[in-house]
Structure formats: structure tokens, C-alpha cells
């Protein structure tokens, strides 16, 4: 008895089914990639908005720190005023913070010189953590408490108190979804966008933030989305493309929030 083969119609039906499954799978993959980028930008935007609201609510200087190389970010609360200088680059800003930290540690060591050994060891661990931070390692420690108005902004604090700490919840170190990366962070007080290293966006207790634009990239889908922050209102927007200048891409401002003059 001769075996029956496939007819042309049956082969066409099978090919149509396989093509349909491949098309559906491709659409599902594109949706999954789009979902990762959407989720990442939404999470970053939420951190910015939280920092703005919180800085105004408790009268404390806050910062959102972004590490572009590792695609991580977190929120910091600062116990005293941190001076900013327009036109600095991230390296200069880092060196300035390191010098301030060295001075703080020096004062702490002098203040603790007469105290018993266990506390001296604690100061030593603090110093070692600061040295490790120079290499971009540990972020600031957790905040000891969340008491509103514990120390007014600009007030003197104990020498052993770190200038910034991570508040519970928002201070958690977060990482972008797999396949998503920080492309650049443009901040008002820096002369150029940050494309590597660490960038810090400042939120002041008077209800003012640094105008900023954060670009997030999905290299697989070849898409770049943007998160923009307005300085006076704290409005945060998520855009499915980089913004134009008239949509918030221009972030060069002076301390009063006015556009910096063209050079």
C-alpha cells in the first residue's frame, strides 16, 4: 500500500500556522522590551518626584544619585547645605566632595581622640568607607531616623555625622531592568551632560530642584526615552523620545532658575 504524502494545501496551512506563531512571538518580544523601558523610566521618575516632595515636606536637602556604569540609582538625604558651583564637571564635583569628606573625617578623629577604643574603631570604619567611596563603591549609609526637621538645613551637625544618608524606602539601591541603561544625565549646574561615572540631581528644601534630563536607552529595541524634571514645580515627565529644547532639553540655568546667557 502506497504511503500518502502531504498535499500542497496541507503544507500551506502548516506554513501559515508557523508564520502566525512567529509573528505573535515577535510582537510579544517587542511588547516585553517596551515594557522594560517603560517600567524603568517610570521608576526613575517616581524617585525624582519623591525627592522633590520629601525635600519640601521635611525641609531637608535631597539628592538623586545615578551611577551610569552600573545603571543604579538611589535617593539621598543631606543633613547640611551642600554648595554647588555652576560649570563644574563631575570629576571636579567629586574632588570637592572628597575634600569636604576628608575635612569632616579629620574633625571627627579629633573629636573622638579622647573617647574609648570601640568608638575610635567606628571612626576608622567610617574613614575606610569614605576611602572606598572614592573608587565609586559603597553609597552613603542608611539614615538613622526619619524625624522631620531634626536639623534645619545649613545648621551645624556633629563632625561624625555623614553629610548625606539614604532614607528608608527611597534610599534603596535600584537597578534598571535588564537591557536598559542610562545614556546620559544633564543637570543644570554642570556644563556638560554626564555620560559616565556618577551624577547627582539636587532638590532643595525651599521647593526648588535642578532642571534635569535623564536619557534611558534600550539598545535591543534601538529606543531612547527621556525623564525630564522642572525646577520650580517638580513636574516630572516621561517622554518616548529625547526632548527638544522647547520641551525641556535645555537645562543650563543659574541659581535663580533663569536661562544662562549664551557664551
Image (cartoon, helix red, strand yellow):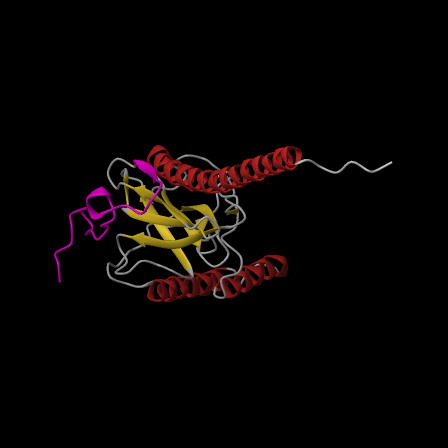
- In this orientation, which residue lies closer to the viewer: 223 or 233? 223
Q: Residue at x 24, y 44 (%)?
A: 248
Rendered-image quadrant of the C terminus? bottom left
**Magenta stretch: dominant secondary structure:** loop
- In this orientation, which residue lies closer to the viewer: 10 or 70? 10
Q: Residue at x 30, y 42 (%)?
A: 229
Residue 116 coordinates in the image, percent (x, y): 61, 59
Up/down of 202 relative to 192, above or below: above
Describe residue 139's horizontal placement relative to residue 203 as left or right: right
Q: Residue at x 50, y 47 (%)?
A: 176
Residue 12 coordinates in the image, percent (x, y): 61, 36
Q: Is residue 241 magenta?
A: yes
Residue 262 coordinates in the image, percent (x, y): 12, 58
Up/down of 40 relative to 136, above or below: above
Q: Is residue 154 visible?
A: no
Which range is magenta? 235-263
Tell me the quarter of the picture where residue 233 sits: top left
- In this orientation, which residue lies closer to the viewer: 4 or 50? 4
Residue 196 coordinates in the image, percent (x, y): 41, 61
Q: Is residue 187 magenta?
A: no
- In this orientation, which residue lies closer to the viewer: 15 or 173? 15
Q: Residue furthest right?
A: 1
Amino acid at each position: 500500500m502506497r504511503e500518502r504524502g502531504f498535499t500542497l494545501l496541507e503544507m500551506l496551512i502548516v506554513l501559515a500556522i508557523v508564520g502566525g506563531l512567529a509573528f505573535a512571538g515577535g510582537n510579544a518580544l517587542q511588547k516585553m522590551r517596551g515594557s522594560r523601558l517603560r517600567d524603568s523610566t517610570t521608576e526613575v521618575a517616581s524617585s525624582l518626584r519623591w525627592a522633590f516632595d520629601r525635600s519640601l515636606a521635611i525641609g531637608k536637602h535631597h539628592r538623586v544619585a545615578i551611577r551610569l556604569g552600573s545603571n543604579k540609582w538611589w535617593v539621598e538625604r543631606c543633613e547640611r547645605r551642600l554648595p554647588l558651583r555652576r560649570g563644574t564637571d563631575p570629576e571636579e564635583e567629586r574632588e570637592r566632595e572628597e575634600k569636604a569628606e576628608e575635612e569632616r573625617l579629620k574633625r571627627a578623629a579629633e573629636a573622638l581622640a579622647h573617647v574609648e577604643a570601640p568608638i575610635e574603631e567606628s571612626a576608622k570604619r567610617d574613614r575606610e568607607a569614605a576611602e572606598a567611596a572614592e573608587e565609586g563603591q559603597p553609597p552613603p549609609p542608611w539614615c538613622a531616623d526619619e524625624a522631620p526637621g531634626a536639623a534645619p538645613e545649613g545648621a551645624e551637625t556633629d563632625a561624625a555625622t555623614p553629610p548625606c544618608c539614604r532614607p528608608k524606602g527611597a534610599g534603596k539601591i535600584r537597578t534598571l531592568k535588564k537591557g536598559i541603561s542610562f545614556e546620559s544625565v544633564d543637570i543644570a549646574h554642570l556644563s556638560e551632560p554626564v555620560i559616565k561615572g556618577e551624577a547627582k540631581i539636587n532638590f532643595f528644601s525651599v521647593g526648588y530642584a535642578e532642571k534635569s534630563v535623564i536619557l534611558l536607552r534600550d539598545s535591543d529595541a534601538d529606543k531612547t526615552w527621556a525623564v525630564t524634571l522642572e525646577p520650580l514645580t517638580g513636574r516630572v515627565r516621561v517622554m518616548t523620545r529625547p526632548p527638544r529644547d522647547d520641551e525641556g532639553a535645555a537645562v543650563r540655568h543659574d541659581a535663580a532658575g533663569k536661562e544662562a546667557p549664551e557664551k
